[in-house]
């Protein structure tokens, strides 16, 4: 993987961890990276955007 800048400590890291994915309407969004260890652990866990849709898929369709 390429060197990325940590979103927490602002230092370059050769082992970046994806901690968030940013979404944007006009710019498209981007990936937020952090150093492995304390920096990555300090970010809150992201919500799975497909978590709610799986409930809809599990409900049987009645004809």
Image (cartoon, rainbow, N blue to C red):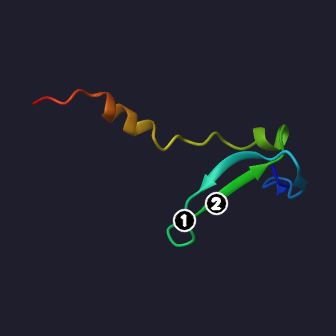
In-image side of 44 versus 24 (left or right): right
Residue 43 % position (x, y): 71, 44
Farthest residue to the front: give it: 1
Is residue 42 found left or right of 59 in the rendered image? Answer: right
Residue farthest to the bottom, as pictured: 26
Label whose residue precedes the other's in the sequence (1 or 2) = 1
| Secondary structure under the numbered disc 2 in the rendered image | strand
Relative to 31, is 44 above or below?
Answer: above
Q: Name the residue under label 1.
A: 24
Q: In this view, does 1 lie above or below 50?
A: below
Give how far apart the Cα atoms at labels 1 and 2 are.
8 Å
Q: Which of 51 and 44 is in front in this view?
A: 51
Measuring from the top left, give residue 10's x and y in whole percent.
86, 58
At numbered mark 1, what does the secondary structure look like: helix, strand or loop? loop
Specify the quadrant of the image occupied by residue 47. top right
Which residue position holds label 2? 30
Q: Where residue 5 appears, x then y in whole percent?
A: 83, 58
Query: Residue at image x 57%, y 71%?
Result: 27
Q: Is residue 23 left or right of residue 5?
A: left
Question: Could you tell me which residue is drawn at 67 percent across and 55 percent down?
Answer: 31
User: Do the CB atoms of the residues marked 1 and 2 lie less than 8 Å apart?
Assistant: yes
Label 2 packing within 10 angstroms: few (<14), some (14-19), many (20+): few
Residue under the point 59% across and 63% down? 29
Looking at the rendered structure, the number of numbered marks drawn on it comes to 2
> Which one is in front, 1 or 47?
1
């Amino acid at each position: 993987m390429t060197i990325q800048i940590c979103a927490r400590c602002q230092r370059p890291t050769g082992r970046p961890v994806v901690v968030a994915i940013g979404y944007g309407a006009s710019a498209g969004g981007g990936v937020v990276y952090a150093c492995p260890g304390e920096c990555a652990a300090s970010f809150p866990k992201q919500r799975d955007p497909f978590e709610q849709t799986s409930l809809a898929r599990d409900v049987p369709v009645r004809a």
